Image: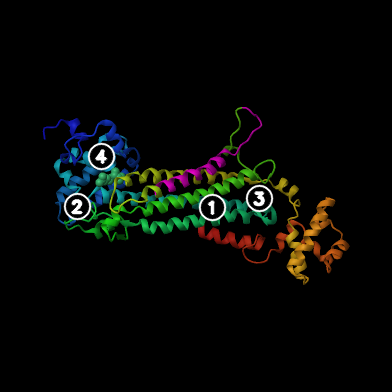
């Protein structure tokens, strides 16, 4: 149309409707290329499937399809090798790819957008991206779970305190605590897998809002892209971002879980707690204090939950009050969802390394294990077995703890006569109920922190994570 090459490169396909053009600043304000260029592979995949369906449905010829297909492959190759210029005036990755295609294959490239709008196109790209994102997240979660399971196998039999209120509570095998994190992570994986079902719906064929008059074969497009079904309602399909909000929630909760674990391990690795030794590779030192070894990787994992919650809140706030049907606000969804997944993926990777290289500080744990009356509940339960009502037993043992604390003794060091005097029928076998190691041996039902239960859990997780 008499345009020179550089003008046509930045000319938008819908420019004819508008009588004046955005200045550079407005153009860059409108653009989402900085974030949606990350979706290029999905955009190409969607276009390839769409073009093939168009040819199979007789809307373009086989020859036209082949020229579009080869053109898309060559555009993809250039993007892959960072050779494609992406002028910001083209706004987004969809327009960049289409313009590059038309530049290469000529007018036939203009047939690609037949029966399609950027509204159903971007919804599709996001779904293709989210599907992969979920698969990556799930495999990283599994990698971290395996690291915890390995630690539970390596040093799981070490007896450590379990905490409530961050105060010493009851003794447990360390493996039991490691597998508590594995449970938490499994719920994250389950939630993501559940979200994937709602992500896995093909939106192509919805057009801008109410569909298209052209006879598209939606089933075929869905099939070509590996979707088990296509969307039922075009208005919903083009304006729905629930699947992204869910994904952001799943990432936010996952990052909250990681932050809880990170907080635990930061505390456990302090000189004061002395439960855990972190590998130096995951720590940093201080520019001033030569003795320092800080758990900075864990601190940053702890910090990331803030960003995760912020992104979820940002996306929900963006969606709130949006009228049904596409609005440009939706363009900014990517600014929350893409970094949400990125942050989780990198935190999971580092977390797996931290866990794989950590070790329990067995001598220090043993030194401090009998501090804090971890066996008090067990003593009360001993009395229960002798027929004492639990409330009464609790009261009696509470009194004994006060006395032992005053005398600087452990419960096991209180003479039998004193125990008898306080609690009635106490026999010499009480010693088998006192001391952390003995308590752990006596844990009875499934789900407790003893050896039999640990073995059962380990077997379960090894089978499940294989
Ligand atoms: N860049 C846009 C987005 O990400 C693509 C869809 C634009 N559609 C439109 N009608 N303006 O949402």
312 falls in the magenta region: yes
Residue 99: % across, % down: 21, 39
Residue 146's disc number: 1
Q: Which is the main secondary structure of the residues drawn in magenta?
A: helix
Residue 166's disc number: 3
Residue 46: % across, % down: 27, 50
Q: What is the distance, in whole Å, between disc 2 and disc 1 at their CAs? A: 47 Å
Q: Which residue is the site of mark 2? A: 115
Along the line of sight, the residue nearer the viewer: 277 or 1: 1
Residue 69: % across, % down: 22, 46
**Residue range corresponding to the magenta coloring:** 288-315
Q: Residue at x 72, y 45 (%)?
A: 364
Rendered position, 281 above or below 223 = above
Q: Residue furthest front?
A: 321
Residue 440's disc number: none
Q: Identify the mark nearer the N-term, 2 or 1.
A: 2
Q: Which residue is the site of mark 4? A: 96
């Amino acid at each position: 149309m008499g345009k020179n090459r550089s003008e046509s490169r930045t000319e938008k396909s819908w420019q004819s409707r508008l009588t004046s053009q955005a200045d550079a600043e407005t153009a860059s304000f409108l653009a989402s290329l900085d974030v949606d260029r990350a979706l290029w592979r999905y955009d190409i995949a969607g276009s390839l499937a769409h073009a093939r369906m168009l040819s199979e449905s007789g809307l373009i010829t086989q020859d036209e399809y082949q020229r579009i297909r080869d053109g898309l492959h060559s555009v993809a190759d250039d993007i892959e090798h960072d050779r494609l210029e992406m002028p910001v005036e083209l706004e987004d990755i969809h327009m960049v790819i289409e313009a590059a295609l038309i530049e290469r294959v000529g007018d036939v490239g203009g047939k690609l957008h037949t029966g399609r709008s950027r509204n159903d196109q971007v919804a599709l790209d996001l779904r293709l991206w989210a599907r992969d994102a979920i698969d990556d997240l799930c495999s990283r979660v599994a990698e971290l779970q395996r690291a915890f399971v390995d630690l539970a196998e390596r040093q799981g039999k070490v007896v450590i305190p379990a905490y409530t209120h961050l105060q010493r509570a009851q003794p447990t095998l360390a493996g039991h605590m490691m597998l508590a994190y594995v449970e938490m992570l499994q719920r994250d994986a389950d939630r993501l897998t559940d979200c994937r079902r709602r992500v896995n719906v093909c939106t192509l064929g919805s057009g801008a809002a109410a569909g298209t008059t052209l006879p598209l074969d939606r089933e075929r497009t869905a099939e070509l892209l590996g979707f088990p079904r296509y969307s039922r309602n075009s208005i919903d399909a083009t304006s729905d971002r629930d699947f992204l909000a869910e994904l952001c929630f799943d990432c936010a909760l996952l990052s909250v879980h990681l932050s809880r674990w990170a907080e635990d391990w930061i505390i456990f690795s302090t000189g004061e707690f002395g439960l855990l030794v972190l590998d130096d590779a995951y720590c940093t030192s201080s520019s001033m204090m030569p003795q320092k070894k800080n758990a900075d990787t864990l601190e940053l994992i702890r910090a990331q939950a803030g960003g995760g919650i912020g992104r979820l809140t940002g996306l929900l706030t963006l969606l709130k009050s949006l009228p049904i049907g596409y609005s440009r606000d939706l363009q900014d969804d990517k600014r929350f969802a893409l970094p949400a997944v990125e942050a989780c993926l990198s935190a999971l990777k580092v977390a797996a390394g931290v866990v794989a290289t950590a070790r329990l500080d067995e001598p220090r744990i043993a030194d401090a294990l009998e501090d804090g009356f971890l066996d008090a509940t067990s003593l009360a339960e001993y009395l229960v077995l002798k027929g004492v009502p639990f409330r009464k037993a609790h009261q009696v043992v509470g009194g004994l703890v006060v006395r032992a604390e005053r005398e600087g003794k452990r419960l096991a060091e209180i003479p039998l006569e004193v125990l008898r005097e306080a609690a009635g029928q106490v026999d010499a076998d009480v010693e088998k109920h006192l001391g952390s190691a003995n308590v752990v041996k006596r844990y009875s039902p499934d789900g407790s922190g003893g050896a039999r239960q640990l073995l059962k859990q380990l077997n379960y997780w090894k089978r499940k994570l294989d």
